[in-house]
């Protein structure tokens, strides 16, 4: 074998990519003629540990404690057997630097038990997570042909299929990258070599460059080697063109994920390979990209790193590219701290003819008629009930009902006025719905319909430019609690159907359709909820967007899904304090990623206290009005439960209040001291997948999504921000946050929080839209579509969501 398997991987690694001859593999010939005697070839990798793998797949490990001179036994039950020895491998699947327990079956399917990093340190904890299938096995591959080796140098083992003639096909490991699939097909990376069979093929890093080389091991022990040149199957995205030697002709450069670069010098009608010109960078480049540009005007292109936030670092060309053994690049210099735009928009060009490439912002994309997916004409204005008439509504089989349809597809929904029928309806108003628009359709149930058990009308729609269609059925069940019903029948477009009860008279029922038959996942509708990990599921679409370029659902007073009674405040009831019907975990499942948590300690007369979510009118008043919601410990458990099931999400927690109230609040707040703050921080540290020590310069919103989702070995990020205004009373400013543990101050991210403070629905919508239009700066903008109720109102906060005053 030419791979070492150990709990903490260092340098030994196995990879395969590219073609054997030519640009990807460089034939080195016979490097070993077989064993005739034993000879020392020097010490092995200093960090490699010793593993004994038993026939049942169980394993024991001895940790390397003295550069290979001493080994210490770890947990005797380090790995219990899950499969026969021949199927068990230890490979780093998620790129965290720890070898995982991997089972590769004869048919090519793969199970993965992730290394928890415990390695026997704590007997109460597991060394491995439960095994999960990560590859079902491609159909039709030869038996025992699947192997796992890291071929592209990203630290994650890729899936390889070795065929009988020595040909190799590769699938890159994308686990943790936010792709909907675990593997990206790279195609054939080795076409086969004459005289080489699949049994002879091995992969190992023979020259210490971090890339696995292709080896053919003969029966007599002799070995032939083809060096991996590091050009991975990135479909051209790894290629750069740069004048490296100042001759005025662009050379070809291949750059990998670590920044390692190889070059081919332009000789006019051909390109001459000169090998590696840059060894790569020992830093996280997941949100950065490597470019080449002449930033000092000397005619030689320099090595440029453009970071996600727009900052730029340059390594100047020493003009020694063609000199063997010479240093190619000078030490790094920062040439731009950022230009107020994400790195994806930064380009370099000589704008003024002085020979220097300036830091430029990419021209903003413009909409073209060919790609137009919106409609620039006004739609009929929707109806909503004025608050003055709210008490006049009655539950009846007759009267008005509204059906809102939202079209987020690139196709027009064409209403078939001739094919539709509505003879039992007094009024019937349906119409076309262009792309990017919604339409509130209105119907009035007839008071004289002959059959009130089954009064109905049907609106038929076709989706323009496709063969797809759907039907809206307006029906009823007389004398039922909810007599009016709407059926959305989408089976004509390959989706499902569902019947909805109209929750209140004149309260709209809504259908949302997005996607397209040309889209990989087809149509997506509001009838069926997709996977709860929506950021991970569409990461390929949004991975290069900054946080402030992503629209994410959020919730207000997020922890108020129940009234726990811990706070005995005058006037606090579920009607005026409970804002949510779902707890934090269920809100996450529903798609929310932005949470406002008002956390306080509730102090009993005995001196004991607990942390709760609160909703009160003024937390610093002598006698605030409101109530307590979920225990903070329950909220932590709910977040951790979700992130363990759905890795790769970015969750933002905004904390407010951060003080204490007495159980019966009558003499003002209890401001936290260092002890209470430290206890709160200890609880925050229980939240998994925090992201500590992130550089931000108060511009967290500039982080690209892929940078954050790739944190914690692809498990994503829970970002914690504190409004520390009440800590100022007793806690020094520098002690109010703990960035190393991922606890940041609120102003680490630019946030605009517009509160309408209005009662009328139309006025709220107009105010919110206008504030959105006024927002021309970067940063997070909170759009709050909430009615501010009068002090005395008989409806609860949650009831308002289904009143006809809400036109959604």
Image (cartoon, rainbow, N blue to C red):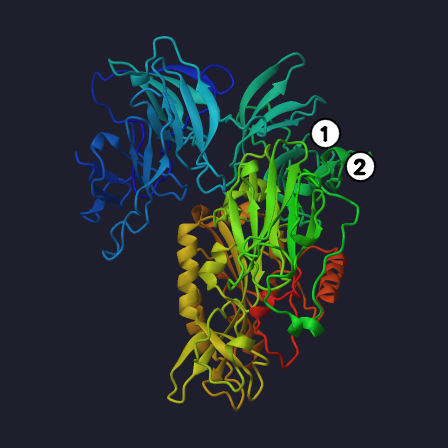
> Viewed as shown, does residue 206 lie left or right of 451?
left
* Residue 383: % across, % down: 72, 60
Q: In which quarter of the image is the N terminus?
A: top left
Q: Residue furthest front?
A: 450
In the rendered structure, which disc, 2 or 1, sits on the residue that comes first in sequence? Answer: 1
Q: Report the residue at 51% width, 64% height from top.
A: 481
Q: In 3D space, how far apart are the residues under numbered discs 2 and 1 (Cα atoms)?
A: 15 Å
Disc 2: which residue: 351
Q: Quadrant of the C terminus?
A: bottom right
Helix, strand or loop at label 1? It is: loop
Closer to the camera in the image, 432 or 197: 432
Q: Which residue is at a point 54% across and 43% down the rendered structure image?
A: 539
Choose between 595 and 656: the one closer to the eye.
Answer: 595
Q: In this view of the protein, can residue 544 be seen by the observer?
A: no
Give the foreground label among 2 and 1. 2
* Residue to which mark 1 is pinned: 299
Crowd rating for badge 2 (residues with CA inside 10 Å; few <14, some 14–19, many 20+): few
Residue 502 can be seen in this image: yes
Residue 122 rendering spot, x and y as whole percentages: 25, 56
Extreme residue toward the right, this view:
352
């Amino acid at each position: 074998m030419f791979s070492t398997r150990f709990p903490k991987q260092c340098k030994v690694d196995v990879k395969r990519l590219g073609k054997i001859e030519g640009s990807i593999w460089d034939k080195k010939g016979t490097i070993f003629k077989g064993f005739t005697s034993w000879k020392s070839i020097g010490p092995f990798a200093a960090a490699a540990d010793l593993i004994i793998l038993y026939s049942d797949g169980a394993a024991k490990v001895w940790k390397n404690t003295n550069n290979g001179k001493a080994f210490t036994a770890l947990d005797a039950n380090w790995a219990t057997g899950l499969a026969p020895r021949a199927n068990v491998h230890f490979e780093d699947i998620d790129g965290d630097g720890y070898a995982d327990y991997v089972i590769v079956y004869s048919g090519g399917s793969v199970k993965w038990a992730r290394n928890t990093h415990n390695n026997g340190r704590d007997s109460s904890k597991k060394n491995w997570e439960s095994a999960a299938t990560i590859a079902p096995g491609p159909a039709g591959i030869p038996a025992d042909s699947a192997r796992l080796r890291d071929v592209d140098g990203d630290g994650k083992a890729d899936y390889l299929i070795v065929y009988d003639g020595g040909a190799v096909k590769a699938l890159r490991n994308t686990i943790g990258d936010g792709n909907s699939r675990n593997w990206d097909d790279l195609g054939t990376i080795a076409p086969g070599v004459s005289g080489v069979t699949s049994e002879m093929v091995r992969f190992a890093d023979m020259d210490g460059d971090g890339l696995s080389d292709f080896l053919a091991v003969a029966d007599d022990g002799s070995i032939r080697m083809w060096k991996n040149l590091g050009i991975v199957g990135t479909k051209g995205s790894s290629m750069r063109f740069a004048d490296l030697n100042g001759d005025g002709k662009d050379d070809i450069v291949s750059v990998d994920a670590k920044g390692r670069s190889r070059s081919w010098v332009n000789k006019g009608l051909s390109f001459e390979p000169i090998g590696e010109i840059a060894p790569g960078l020992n830093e996280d480049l997941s949100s950065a990209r490597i470019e080449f540009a002449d930033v000092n005007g000397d005619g030689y292109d320099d090595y440029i790193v453009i970071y996600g936030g727009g900052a730029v670092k340059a390594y100047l060309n020493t003009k020694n590219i063609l000199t063997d053994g010479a240093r190619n690049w000078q030490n790094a210099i920062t040439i731009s701290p950022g230009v107020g735009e994400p790195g994806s928009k930064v380009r370099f060009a000589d704008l003024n003819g002085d020979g220097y490439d300036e830091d430029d912002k990419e021209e903003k994309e413009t909409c073209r008629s060919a790609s137009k997916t919106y409609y620039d004409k006004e739609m009929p204005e929707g109806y909503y009930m004025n608050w003055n008439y709210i008490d006049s509504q009655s539950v009846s089989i007759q009267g008005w009902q509204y059906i809102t349809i939202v079209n987020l597809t690139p196709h027009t929904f064409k209403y078939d006025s001739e094919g539709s029928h509505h003879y039992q309806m007094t009024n019937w108003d349906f119409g076309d719905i262009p792309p990017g628009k919604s339409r509130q359709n209105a119907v009035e149930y007839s008071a004289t319909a002959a059959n009130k058990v089954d009064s109905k009308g049907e609106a038929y729609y076709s989706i323009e430019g496709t063969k797809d269609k759907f039907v809206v059925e307006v029906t009823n069940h007389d004398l039922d609690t909810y007599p009016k019903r709407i059926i959305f029948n989408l089976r004509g477009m390959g989706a499902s159907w569902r019947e909805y009860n109209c929750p209140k008279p004149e309260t709209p029922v809504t259908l949302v359709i997005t996607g397209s038959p040309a889209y990989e996942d087809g149509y997506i509708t509001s009838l069926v909820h997709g996977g709860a990990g929506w950021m991970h599921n569409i990461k390929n679409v949004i991975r290069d967007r900054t946080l402030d370029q992503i629209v994410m659902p959020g919730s207000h007073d997020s922890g108020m899904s129940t009234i726990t009674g811990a706070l005995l405040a005058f006037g606090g009831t579920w009607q005026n304090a409970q804002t949510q019907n779902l707890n934090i975990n269920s809100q996450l499942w529903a798609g929310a990623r932005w949470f406002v948590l008002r956390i306080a300690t509730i102090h009993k007369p005995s001196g004991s206290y607990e942390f709760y979510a609160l909703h009160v009118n003024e937390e610093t008043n002598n006698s605030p009005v409101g109530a307590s919601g979920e225990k903070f410990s329950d909220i932590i458990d709910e977040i951790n439960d979700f992130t363990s099931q759905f890795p790769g999400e970015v969750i933002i927690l905004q904390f407010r209040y951060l003080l204490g109230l007495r159980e019966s609040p009558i003499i003002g707040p209890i401001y936290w001291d260092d002890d209470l703050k430290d206890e709160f921080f200890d609880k925050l540290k229980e939240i998994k997948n925090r992201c500590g020590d992130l550089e931000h310069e108060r511009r967290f919103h500039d982080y690209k999504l892929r940078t954050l989702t790739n944190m914690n070995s692809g498990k994503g990020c829970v970002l914690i921000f504190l409004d520390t205004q009440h800590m100022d009373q007793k806690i020094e400013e520098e002690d109010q946050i703990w960035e190393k543990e991922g606890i940041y101050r609120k102003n680490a991210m630019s946030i605009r929080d517009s509160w309408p403070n209005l009662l009328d629905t139309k006025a709220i919508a107009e105010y919110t839209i206008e504030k959105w239009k006024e927002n021309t700066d970067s940063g997070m903008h909170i759009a709050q579509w909430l009615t501010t109720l009068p002090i005395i109102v008989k409806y609860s906060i949650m009831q308002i969501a289904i009143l006809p005053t809400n036109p959604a």
